[in-house]
Image (cartoon, helix red, strand yellow):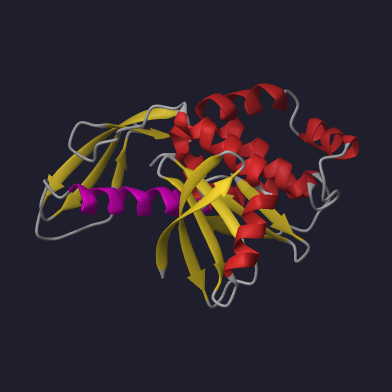
Amino acid sequence: MAQPQTASLGERDVPFILKRSRRRRSIAFSIDGNGLVVSAPWNASDSRIRKSMADGAAWIIRKLDEWSGYEPREQRWADGEQLAFLGNNLTLNVVTDAVLIPPVLHDQRCLQVTVANAANETRIHEAVVGWYRRHAARNFTDRIEVFAASMQLPAPKMFLSNARTQWGSCNTRQQVRLNWRLVQAPQEVIDYVVVHELAHLFEMNHSKRFWRIVERHCPGHMEVRKHLNERGHWYLDI
């Protein structure tokens, strides 16, 4: 259930969408070009939700301001449009056919998508996202195995994330979640995020020791982080 609401955070009235779920156990915030979404347990009281928002007000305001400074991506899902994949541009080739087949990549330059109606951008978008997710799953799993071996770790289980505000996460159950949208970025960017999350299996923080582990396995990570800071909102806005 989604409910439009407004909260006073400092001197600002912030509109947000409240989403309640019976599966959720904690309150979480996500922010993108469409604004703030607050996800909460089904039985969370209004006062608990408002207190959580007040506690996170500085982060919420900062992220809203960051997103407001970016122009919308304005990606169209039509024949001839450009897509990002592993740091390169692909041309979207839309084919109309009653027999639907999965998208096909030709010569690393053209992604052919078959739909029943070439004017239906929603269907084209869905097909491309499905293709991105399949390639992301294979790529991320392979890179986790490579870096886990070099870090002398058992390869953790990988799950794809659909988050709008973060690239990855890990937990003490040896599970790593990586945002499928990363597959648009160059491979070295993906590798950095993989190393970053694996390093958290040693250090569940961002201490100096954590960053030494990242540096050891991903030299030059500062440049990659700069790329994500500059380009990340564009990747997320899809």
**106 inside magenta stretch:** no
**Position of 95 compared to 145: left or right?**
left
Instruction: Check the image and report above or below for 13 versus 110.
Output: below
Which residue sits at x=70%, y=55%? 170
Which residue sits at x=75%, y=66%? 173
Q: The C terminus lies in which quarter of the figure?
A: top left
Task: Please tell me which residue lies in front, 8 or 98.
Answer: 8
**131 inside magenta stretch:** yes
Instruction: Check the image and report above or below for 197 versus 228.
Output: below
Residue 56, image x and y in percent?
Answer: 67, 48
Task: Please tell me which residue lies in front, 51 or 228.
Answer: 51
Residue 174, image x and y in percent?
Answer: 74, 62
State the extent of the magenta-drawn residues as a range.
121-137
In which quarter of the view is residue 63 placed? top right
Picture mark count: 0
**Position of 33 compared to 90: left or right?**
right
What secondary structure predominates along the stretch shown in magenta?
A: helix
Instruction: Check the image and report above or below for 75 versus 2.
Output: above
Which residue sits at x=58%, y=38%? 11
